[in-house]
């Protein structure tokens, strides 16, 4: 877990299940187990990378942490305060401490608002600034993320994809948060622009001691920016350790498969490819026992009936696998 006594964010056994309803009476006929009992902590100034295939529950976990969607069960603590069951009014002070950068810079900005109003809206809503003071704060935010204050009067369609994501970052910074959930913030951008945005996030973290929950399926990006990594599969965390341990001593078979798919820049380095068989099971009907056993080349009879606990196999290195 985090090295400090009190993490900025601590999540314990978080679950989010979506009911599936059918028929005229909209009766519940099943559940989608999007997030199925995950736990982690993030210290001040730390980045936790949350990785996994599309549909594994990464984004749902990030939004549940911020209470943008209500968790089914579990506990969420921000600076030692449990926010899991707070009302909207009680959540308001915590909204300033937690912000999000969305994946798609094209749809996350209101096309009817100029960029300056988009960035200034949180300051106005929370009563932090108004009038000339508001304009000055917004101009300073524009400059900090690499935009010109003159662009405050432009609409989102007048910016490139990378510039729009910078606007999203400026909006997230406006209230001086302690935690930012970055939901695949560079996946929709060109590779050269991705590097600029990642470097901007790294610089901002260094300056402001920000904590990031960095959600991505790009392991190369996660390796660069993250201090620790949690690997998710079908709603559960299967491995949780510092970045170096994951990339040099990844223990879970799913982690091995993910790492084998990362391109190696040196052609002299030969890496054994581990191609997973079959498709990801439906989160409506996850397999019994270990969720990964249907695709695991090492699965034994125990894996099919008993769900493995996330246990510590080395200091700070947790794995959910019966064979480790």
Image (spheres, rainbow, N blue to C red):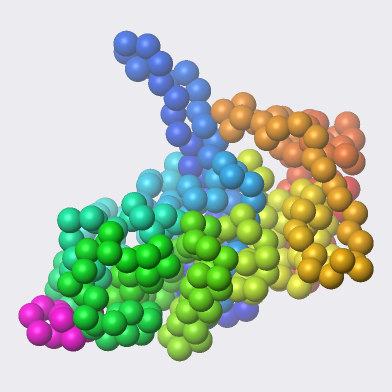
Residue situated furthest left in the rendering: 131
Q: Is residue 131 magenta?
A: yes
Name the residue rendered at 60%, 73% in the picture: 225
The answer to whether any part of residue 217 appears in the image is yes
Query: For the stretch drawn in magenta, what is the main secondary structure?
Result: helix
Number of disc labels? 0
Classify 302 as above or below 180: above
Q: In the displayed structure, does residue 136 sit left or right of residue 312?
A: left
Name the residue rendered at 57%, 80% in the picture: 4
**How far from the left and from the top, in percent, is residue 109?**
29, 58
**How far from the left and from the top, in percent, is residue 281?**
66, 31
**How far from the left and from the top, in percent, is residue 76?**
46, 58
The answer to whether any part of residue 11 appears in the image is no
The span picked out in magenta is: 129-138
Name the residue rendered at 51%, 70% in the picture: 193
**How far from the left and from the top, in percent, is residue 46?**
56, 76
């Amino acid at each position: 877990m985090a090295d400090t006594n009190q993490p900025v964010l601590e999540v314990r056994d978080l679950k989010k299940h979506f009911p599936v309803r059918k028929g005229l009476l909209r009766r519940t006929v099943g559940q989608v187990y999007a997030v199925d009992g995950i736990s982690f902590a993030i210290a001040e100034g730390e980045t936790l990378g949350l990785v996994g295939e599309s549909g594994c529950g990464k984004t749902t976990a990030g939004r549940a942490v911020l209470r943008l969607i209500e968790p089914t069960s579990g506990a969420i603590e921000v600076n030692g305060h449990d926010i899991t069951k707070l009302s909207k009014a009680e959540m308001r002070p915590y909204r300033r401490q937690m912000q999000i950068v969305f994946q798609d810079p094209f749809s996350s900005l209101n096309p009817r608002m100029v960029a300056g109003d988009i960035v200034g809206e949180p300051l106005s809503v929370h009563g932090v600034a108004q009038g000339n003071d508001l304009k000055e704060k917004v101009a300073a935010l524009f400059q900090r993320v690499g935009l010109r204050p003159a662009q405050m009067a432009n609409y989102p369609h007048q910016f490139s994809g990378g510039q729009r994501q910078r606007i999203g970052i400026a909006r997230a910074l406006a209230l001086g948060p302690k935690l930012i959930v970055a939901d695949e913030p560079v996946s929709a951008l060109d590779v050269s622009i991705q590097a600029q945005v990642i470097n901007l996030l790294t610089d901002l973290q260094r300056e402001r001691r920000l904590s990031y929950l960095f959600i991505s399926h790009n392991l190369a990006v996660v390796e660069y920016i993250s201090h620790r990594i949690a690997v998710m599969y079908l709603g559960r965390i299967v491995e949780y350790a510092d970045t170096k341990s994951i990339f040099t001593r990844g223990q879970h078979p799913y982690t091995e498969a993910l790492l084998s798919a990362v391109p190696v820049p040196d052609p002299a380095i030969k890496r054994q490819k581990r191609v997973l068989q079959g498709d990801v099971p439906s989160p409506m009907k996850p397999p019994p026992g270990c969720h990964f056993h249907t695709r695991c080349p090492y699965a034994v009879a125990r894996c099919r009936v008993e769900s493995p606990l996330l246990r510590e196999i080395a200091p700070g290195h947790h794995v959910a696998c019966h064979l480790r």
